[in-house]
Image: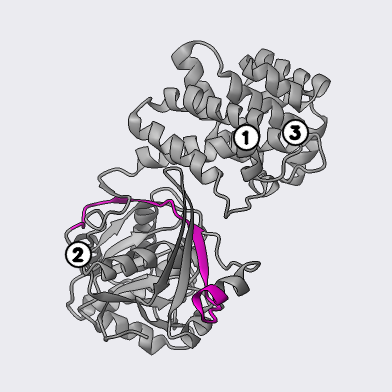
Amino acid sequence: MMSMQRKETVIQFGEGGFLRGFVDYFFQKLKEKELFDGSVVVVQPIEKGMIGELNKQNCEYNLFLRGIDKGEVVDEHTHIDVISRCINPYTEYEAYEKLAENPDFRFIVSNTTEAGIEFVSDNKLEDKPAKSFPGKLTQLLYRRFLLGLKGFIILSCELIDHNGEELKKCCMKYADLWNLGEEFKTWMETENDFCSTLVDRIVTGFPREEHEALCKRIGEQDNMMDTAEIFHLWVIQGDHEDELPLVKAGYNVIWTDNVDPYKKRKVRILNGAHTSMVLGAHLYGLETVGECLKDEKVSALLKKCIFEEIIPTIGDTQDNRNFGEAVLERFANPFIRHLLLSIALNSVSKFKARVLPTILEYKEKYGSYPQGLTFSLAALIAFYRTDAANDGEEIVAFMKEASVADILKKEEYWGQDLSPMLDVVQKWYDCIEAEGMEKAYGEVLA
């Protein structure tokens, strides 16, 4: 139970595992360090959700952060009680609307999935509530504006580029659609800060297989238990450290005027490493990321790709090397069973976004193609020959039958004709097909 009633200062759109394992953890820790004296009100952003379960537990739950940090195994338990109440705007619209009236509210955080930040033209101001998340937010902001109160610091955590800017664009469109006036749009622009952010933490959610054991460990039943890795990074465009002292509290939070370089680092090193590793490793007979890190050949190729090809291409800085080392620790996390085939979903589009830009930039920079990453493209082609490939029907059908040359020419897949790469990719593909993955790994590592 909460020991005292704290003032409500944060409105949170979303009650899922990610926000409860990321943002609410930070607010909880700031409270414990006496750097934050507020509490969080959770708003359920869609009609069906989990706030009923949270309310049953007085909005409290337990979070377990587990992983490897600087070589040490970490298993941290935190009891989260920073949420004061939950509101379902579909059944409690008046309570939702009243949030606008409280001048103590300063922050809005959201994670409404990648599809959540969208403009839906049939939403109306009179809807109770508007269906889309930006529609609901505009209703709240407009009420706030009419009351003459100051605006919010809005921290979007959805996994899309420039999430804060995209959210603001949607709210501006609703202001136009609903004829809310230029004065309101100016207030939205000048009195609110729509911060784009990059969030990075693997949140594994409800621990179904371990639930009973973890309940025994803490001595209570918790049906909203959450689990996540220990690693975290939150890059926020703007600077509100004075009101939200996350850096002072010792967390890996970066206030910046540009999130893009951090996004590039994450996509190229973390996501690029995943995508370049998993398809060859599956053909080699492995099932999980953890197994990959324990295998001498697969882990050696992973390190080659990260430290000899990706990082030299995007910038061989100590920060990037530290990030690369952290990626290896995260992949080796003994508490997470990350299946290769779940990462393999839609690998053609993932390869285009995560790995191909590094291959092309490496060639431009060094005059030759990187061996490890081009090997991973050959492994992708070999993987798509198997029945394990999971992608769009047309892509799977084409990749299964087409020659390596025709696949590389397919501009709609890669954004350009990759025929200049044919010799090196064909060499590795032939090696995989003729000798098998084990020998092929030996060749590329030689």
Q: Secondary structure at mark 3?
A: helix
Give whichever of discs 3 and 1 has the lower sequence position.
Answer: 1
Residue carrying label 1? 277
Circle 1: is it few (<14), some (14-19), or many (20+) Cα within 10 Å? Answer: many
**In which quadrant will I find the C terminus?**
top right
Say whether disc 1 or disc 2 marks the residue closer to the N-terminus: 2
Look at the image and tell me whether residue 268 can be seen: yes
Against 385, is 85 above or below? below
User: Circle 2 — which element?
Assistant: helix
Quadrant (top left/top right/bottom left/bottom right) for the N terminus: bottom left
Label whose residue precedes the other's in the sequence (2 or 3)? 2
Q: Which of label 2 and label 3 is nearer to you?
A: 3
Q: Which residue position is annotated with label 3?
A: 284
Q: Position of residue 197 (x, y in %)?
A: 36, 52
Q: Amino acid at mark 1?
A: Met
Residue 446 in the image: above or below residue 239: above
| Element at label 1 | helix
Residues at marks 2 and 3, CA–CA distance in whole angstroms: 56 Å
Membership of 237 in magenta stretch:
yes
Checking the image for residue 206, the label placed there is: none
Residue closest to the eye, 180 or 191: 191
Within the image, what quadrant is residue 178 found in? bottom left
Between 38 and 363, the one lying in front of the other is 38
Q: Residue at x 58, y 39 (%)?
A: 274
Residue 207 spot, x, y in % from top left = 59, 66
Report which residue position mark 2 lands on: 191
User: Circles 2 and 3: CB distance less than 8 Å?
Assistant: no
- The magenta-colored residue range is 215-241
Q: Is residue 166 magenta?
A: no
Amino acid carrying label 3: it is Tyr
Mark 3 Cα within 10 Å, few/some/many (few <14, many 20+)? some
